[in-house]
Image (tube, rainbow, N blue to C red):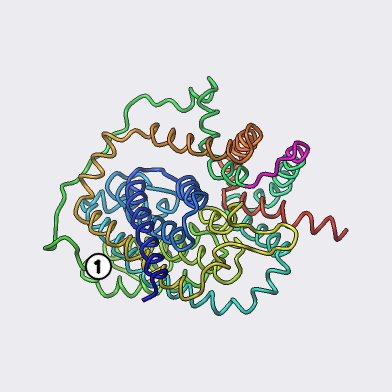
Amino acid sequence: MDPVLIEQIGVAAAMGLIGAVVFAAIGLVSGTDETTTLAPLTLLVVLLGVPPAGVFTFFLAGAVAKHMTHAVPTALLGIPGDTLATPLLQDADLLRKLGVPHIALRKMISGAIIAAFVAVPLAVLFAVMLAPFGQAITKTAPWIFLCAALLIAYFSKGRWAAVALLIPFVVVIIALQTLTAKYDTKLSISYFLGIAIGPLIADLFTVMSPQGRERMKRDKVRQFNLAPDVKGWSGYFPNPFKVIDKTQTRWTLVTAGISSATFVFSPVAMTVVLGELVGSRIKHAYHRLTTVLAARNGVTEATYIAEALIPLIAFGLPLSPVAAGPAAPLFNAPPRFTVDAATGQTHNLHNLMSHWEFLGYGLLAVALAALVSYPFAMNYARRAAMFVSRKVSHEAIIATFVGLIIVISVWEGALLGLLVILTMGLMGGLLSRNFGFNTGVQFMGYYTAVLSVPALIKLF
């Protein structure tokens, strides 16, 4: 074999393993948003100069691992592991009240591992089918971004409010760009990071306000009840096809296949809609709950994979909520990866990796995430949930990410970079909390500002 190829595979495997371990641990911490965690760490990996295959496997293995272990706090503690775990909470709570949270957990992560292995080849296949239209789409990128921003905004929680808010949001970005240009400073990463940690910045400002702090106070410590762990298999690595029955396997494969073909809709919306589709087809209450959980967590995996891979492979443009959010460093991370604002031309993983490399390294990333997260969650979920709820400080995790983001913003734009992050974060966080103007819509608003607005000005 080619020594260069062997070295490339070795780097990819090592980075995939690191991503799987890191995000399997992060997934255990409730409320850790995908954009706030996946995006900054992936950006750090890109800026450190890791080869393209290593960047890709790090991101994908991390995403897959996190969407397996986010089931642990969701099923056992009754609090969502992250944003995409929210649609799973109601059914998981019902099973927790029945005294079988461990069953809910096993169904969820078994559905996730099956869906992940299905989603990678299907997403690559759909991307290859769309690739012939890539050049035409690239030429019309400013208008596609504008249409995609309007579409994603309408299907967000904010609906028409989110669509209307795109206008002032884009104006603020243009104003900040004009300000920084006067000081010969061109920023891109700082806007991205500000949007990514918007809810966190909004919370920090709220805590500094006496009125906000009073509203956030709680009169008692939150309590969680953990059921005893019951192991129903021998060995360390259980067979997921034996954990979920044939009906659940079939629905997991069907929903994963559907979500692997879509890349412009909200992942949360896909999880809810396809879960409702499955639930409407099963009459027995207990079987319906367990089947819906398996399918829905499979959809969280498949949707994330498809929404990152299809735009990346076919176009090189972040034309989905996931691509514009958590996966944004794979597309645009100057100076290494770029999307040219004037022409829509790209220099990122789309240009640096072939279709076969995306397939091979994608399956490698899923395999590494499965080897790390699946047996760990199946065997040690209860102990891990107890350790995290008792010993892990959420404040320490938040402080770690804040420190990382400050370092990156100062590196890119010194004081101006930090001010842009604070401005974008505070505005974006408040709009997200109060109007349903979520981070996916905000990222599309950013690309509208840098791509669509110059084209509109040139046209008129």
217 to the left or right of 171: left
Where on the picture, by quarter, is residue 323?
bottom right
Residue at image point 84% right, 55% down: 457
In this view of the protein, can residue 101 be seen by the observer? yes
In this view of the protein, can residue 34 be seen by the observer? no
Region in magenta? 179-188
Where on the picture, by quarter, is residue 363?
bottom left
Q: Front-most of 324 and 415?
A: 415
Q: Amino acid at mark 1?
A: Pro
Look at the image and tell me in which quarter the N terminus lies: bottom left
Q: Magenta stretch: residue 3 in it? A: no
Residue at image point 35% right, 44% down: 79
Residue sticking out furthest to the left: 234
Exactly how many numbered labels are in the figure? 1
Residue 351 position, x and y percent, is 58, 68
Say which residue label 1 marks: 240
Q: Magenta stretch: residue 185 in it? A: yes
Residue at image point 48% right, 72% down: 123
Residue 398 position, x and y percent, is 43, 35
Residue 272 position, x and y percent, is 45, 60
Where on the picture, by quarter, is residue 8?
bottom left
Q: Does 294 appear above or below 36?
A: below
Q: Which class describes the residues within 10 Å of circle 1: few (<14), some (14-19), or many (20+)?
A: some
Residue sticking out furthest to the front: 3
Secondary structure under the numbered disc 1 in the rendered image: helix
